[in-house]
Image (tube, grey):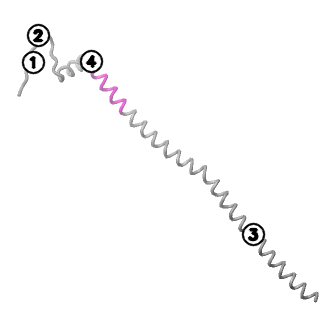
């Protein structure tokens, strides 16, 4: 009878080992996935912030170029010739000067 008990004990211990191995393996897989997700999060956040930063920098570059163009126009209009040209476009004339309107 001892032999049968020994064989049954061996089978039970093998089954118990397989069960523990399955449990440990499953736990390790779940922990690995959790660590992988938590490790990837900062990199995903960095990529998102980098993309937003590139969009903001492009917008800043566009606005800077637009500002430079407007500053150039202001400097051109802030001269006596620029003032005269703008006044004539709006229908102004010097005193004692007659405006001619062509149809």
Seen as rendered, the residue at the extreme right is: 2
Estimate the spatial distance between the alpha carbons at disc 2 and disc 3, rounded to whole Å: 103 Å
Query: Disc 3 designates what residue?
Result: 23
Residue 58 is situated, as x and y percent measured from the top left of the image, at 43, 40
* Residue at left offset 71%, top offset 68%: 26
Instruction: Tell me, for residue 99, which label it has, or none.
Output: 1
Residue 89, picture quadrant: top left
Q: Earlier in the sequence, mark 3 or mark 4?
A: 3
Q: Tell me the number on the disc at residue 79.
A: 4
Q: For the residues labelled 3 and 4, say whether their Cβ atoms are less than 8 Å apart.
A: no
Residue designated by label 2: 96
For disc 3, the neighbor class at 10 Å (few under 14, some 14 to 19, many from 20) is few
Extent of the magenta region: 66-78
Identify the element where label 4 is drawn: loop
Q: Is residue 9 left or right of residue 47?
A: right
Front position in the image: 17 or 73 = 17
The 10 Å Cα crowd at callout 4, few under 14, some 14 to 19, many 20 or more, is few
Q: Residues within 10 Å of mark 1 (few under 14, many from 20)?
A: few
Q: Looking at the image, is mark 3 or mark 1 earlier in the sequence?
A: 3
Separation (CA) of disc 4 from disc 2 = 22 Å
Image quadrant containing the C terminus: top left
């Amino acid at each position: 009878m001892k032999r049968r008990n020994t064989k049954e004990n061996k089978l039970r211990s093998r089954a118990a080992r397989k069960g523990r191995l399955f449990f440990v393996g499953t736990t390790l897989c779940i922990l690995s996935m959790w660590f992988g997700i938590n490790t990837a999060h900062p990199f995903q956040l960095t990529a998102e912030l980098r993309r937003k930063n590139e969009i903001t920098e492009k917008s800043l570059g566009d606005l800077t170029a637009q500002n430079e163009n407007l500053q150039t126009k202001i400097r051109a209009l802030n001269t006596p010739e620029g003032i005269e040209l703008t006044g004539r476009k709006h229908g102004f004339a010097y005193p004692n000067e007659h405006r001619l309107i062509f149809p």
